[in-house]
Amino acid sequence: MSIASSELTAKATAIATSGLRKSYGEIEVLKGIDFGAREGEVVSILGASGSGKSTFLRCLNLLELPSAGSLDIFGERVNLRHSDSGARIGDRKQVDRLRTQVAMVFQNFCLWSHMTILENLMEAPVHVQRRKRAEVREEALSVLEQVGLTHRVDAFPAQLSGGQQQRAAIARALVMKPRVLLFDEPTSALDPELVGEVLKVMRDLATEGRTMLIVTHEMAFARDVSNRILFLEEGQISAQGDPLELFAGGASEGFDRFVRRFNESASR
Amino acid sequence: MDWEFLTDVFLQLLGGVPLTLQLSLTALLAGFILAVVIACAASSRFRLFQWIGGIHTEIFRGTPLLVQIFLIYYGLGQIPGVRHSELWPYLREPYWCAILALALNTSAYTAEIIRGAIQAVPAGEVEAGRACGMSGFLLRRRVTWPIAIRHGLPVYSSEVILMLKATSLASIITLTEVTGIAYKLISSTYRVMEIFAVTGALYLTLTFAISLAFALIERRLQRHLGHRRN
Amino acid sequence: MTLGIYELIGFGPHGWGLPLINAAGITIAAAASGFLLGSVLGVAGAVLKLSRRALLRAVGMFYTTVFRGIPEILIIYLFYFGGSVAFTKMMNLGGLPGFFSLPAFFIGVLAVGIVSGAYQTEAYRAGFLRLDRGQIEAGLSCGMSDLLLLRRIIAPQALRFALPALGNIWQSVLKETALLSVIGLTELLRQSITAAGSTREPLLFYGVAAVMFFVIGRVTGSLLSRTEKRLAKPWSR
């Protein structure tokens, strides 16, 4: 179980957005999101497909560029330039620096296929963070032990199962020693029997007190592990709050509808 | 821009186009027929035929076309048996030597294309045909070959273009196709850029026409795929 | 014939063995240099064709269309005659009268390189397009700069994907060097023309040339395919 919410109010804000909007041409996917995640918080972001939850998450490490609004990471305002032809990164060096502290785990793992698992883990710490090889190697092996992949250190991603690849991807994120972990539907691309091993790793991370923002469809996980649920509908925050309260029902109509529809399709 | 000169060059080059086309088409036709034979040999049950098919492909794809042309034009005449044969009136002519060399060359590449196209036919569709009671020639004609043609056509269009370009080597054994005429013009007037531009444009037009023709045929053959929705 | 075959192609006083081997060396040198030039042009061409700006894409397309659509022998004539004309003009202006021709090796490498570059453009472009976009995003989200991404993620994979096509292009380049015989470069074919003319044994010497081209092609080909297999290991299950 993660840190109780009351203990969190004293902690600093890790990531904050104000009036965040994102449009693709004529279509507006995010319609003004005001959000703040505190250090040590585990936030699950739920919503139907098309609600904008992945887009929102990807805006937080600037894989998507917001069309309007502001983004603050660890209290630092991200420099964005807005023009008629769209938004652009104002200071690439700032973004690269912040990205080393905001690690992302992708739905499709996205391990670098021409490198071994160990090389995958060591790549960014050595080449981006410029840490010493020996130290990084030790750290990488220790993290691989944490996620249970010590025996696959020299394998290539193509030789691993989906669950193993995702655990390796999480390990790759952890070696960066990030202050925030972003998860973009980490289990959606996995066969059902492999989901459990990944959720276990994520559960352990939450217990450690890490700051995690997770876009997911795993309702049970969201209810049991998060400090807060963020529910998006059509590009806006439709409901937000304590998981147990929200899942108990009655707090938000939209959320209740969503959970009901989800349970119906799950039980079919 | 010396339009008069350019036009003059163009008209002279046009004189070489019939020969260029003759060489390409004859070589392609003969080469295709030979390729079918080679492809059959290479996939035959008899080790000897497999071997012959394989050797033919290795030789004609593994050595430069110009060397093949020289071997046939200069080399064959050295063999007494050839000189005294019925074919000698033909084999001493650069025209027929060029066609022979081009045909043998394209047959090796085309045989590979045919082999690849036949292999690309999904086994399931052939099985479905068999399950309907089709066999032998009927099965090939109605199922295997139409599918194989659709796979092989794009690749074969590249081969046709390569053959068109290859006819330019015939100029080296005195034939006055387009490149032969261009060479004469360059070495007499030394106005290299202009002659190259016109000759290049002429070849590009021919190449474009071939690509267009194949694209139209491919489009017609893909009607069964339905209209692509953007 | 007064001399036996083995004496003719051997290394004795009347043997053409040594000149042929030297000429084969020139062939390989010209092919390798041309291929290298082609790889530089090929990367540039691929960058152009993948660019977001339509004008740059058009330039790339012009390059690949022209130099893949025009016969190579014509392009060799262009560089040989055109280069000599230009060089002569330059020297004449500088006060040196007469006709100047550029070294055949230099011209040959230039011509072969430019043509090979057009084909290599397509190979690199196809290799790049096979890359999984997600791996680039993973790199970005680790804070990688564009240069680091290119060096560590994009190039290693794009090149591996391009290798089979590049192998075929190498074989073409090797055979194309035979065309350089017409501008007087003493590569393998030119040398066998000389030998054939001098000994009146065209069948023998063109046959030997064919065999030598074949062997060079096979040996380099198998080296390449072994490298290819080794580099493709990450993707084998």
Image (tube, rainbow, N blue to C red):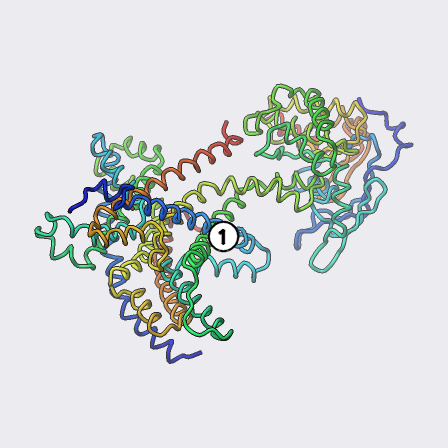
The percent coordinates of residue A62 (x first, y second) are: 72, 45
Quarter of the image for the N terminus of chain B: give it.
bottom left
Residue A153 occupies quadrant: top right
Count of labels in the image: 1
In percent of width and height, residue C159 lies at: 52, 42
Q: Name the residue beneath numbered marker 1.
A: C37
Q: Relative to residue A233, is residue B45 drawn left or right?
A: left
Q: Position of residue B123 (x, y in %)?
A: 34, 33
Relative to B15, does residue C139 appear above or below in the rendering?
A: above
> What residue lies at 74% left-to-right and 23% top-to-bottom?
A203
Q: Is label 1 in a helix, a strand or a loop?
A: helix
Chain of the residue where label 1 is placed in the rendered structure: C
Q: Is residue B98 visible?
A: yes
Where in the figure is residue A18, as x and y percent of width and height? 82, 46
**Extreme residue toward the front, this view:** C13
Q: What amino acid type should be assigned to the residue bearing mark 1? A: Leu
Q: Report the side of C58 relative to B98 (left or right).
A: right
Give the residue displayed 30% in from the left and 73% down from the top: B12
Classify residue A86 as left or right of residue C123. right
Q: Nearer the viewer, residue B223 or C185?
A: C185
